[in-house]
Amino acid sequence: MNVGTALALCSMGVSAFAVLAVGAVYARLRGLERAEGAGDAARLAPAGLSPAGGQAVSLVVLLDGGCALCPGLWRQARAFTADRPDVRLVGLVAAEEAARRLADPGGPGECAPLADPGAWAEMYEGYTPCLYLVRANGVIAHRAFVYADTDVPALLTRALPAPAVPANQGGRA
């Protein structure tokens, strides 16, 4: 084999890899376009994440055991919803090990993360942590990715509707 033949074979290998890479990127983009194009169609959360017991909404916090932001976000979400009986807080992780790592028995609220690989895979969009607001009918009403510079209390205030105040408990008569 001479140098020219070796160079041609290497060039063909690189070209084949490039074609496969472009095909993979194209397939991913088409999938994202389909998901975005169905923007008018309501996205449903897995049944186990819906509010229960008369609660208005579920705040689903999609977490990952290896995520640096996840423990802090989980603590903040627990503190924010501790006095909100109308909100079901669900910390969703893919593995029991991650649930144990994120569990904080001394922290605010009594909620421990739920390890459900199927629900986690259905909700996961390529990034954690992420917040989802799920209505009583199972429709995902809000989604927000949380980054290192995200103002989490402000995000939670915007995402969660204010609790309803009964007519006989404050407000104008």
Image (cartoon, rainbow, N blue to C red):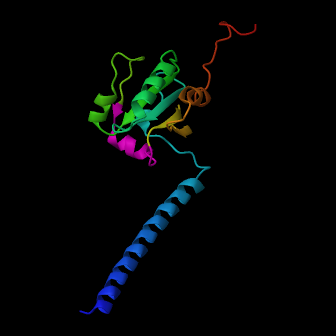
The image quarter containing residue 8 is bottom left
Residue 48 in magenta stretch: no
The residue stretch that appears in magenta: 114-127
Q: Which residue, as the protein is rendered here, is positioned at the far front?
A: 3
Where does residue 54 sit, x and y in percent of width and height? 51, 21
Where does residue 151 sit, x and y in percent of width and height? 56, 30
The quarter of the image holding the N terminus is bottom left
The image quarter containing residue 129 is top left
Q: Which residue, as the protein is rendered here, is positioned at the far left?
A: 1
Residue 52 shows in the view: no
Report the side of 164 relative to 54 (left or right): right
Residue 119 in magenta stretch: yes
User: Viewer-proximal residue, 14 or 56?
Assistant: 14
How many marks overall?
Answer: 0
Q: In this view, does 87 lie above or below 30?
A: above
Q: In this view, does 119 lie above or below 82?
A: below
User: Viewer-proximal residue, 64 or 132?
Assistant: 64
Residue at the image point whose x is 59% and y is 56% from the top: 37
The quarter of the image holding the C terminus is top right
The image quarter containing residue 156 is top right
Q: Which residue, as the protein is rendered here, is positioned at the far right?
A: 173
Residue at the image point whose x is 64% and y is 12% from the top: 166
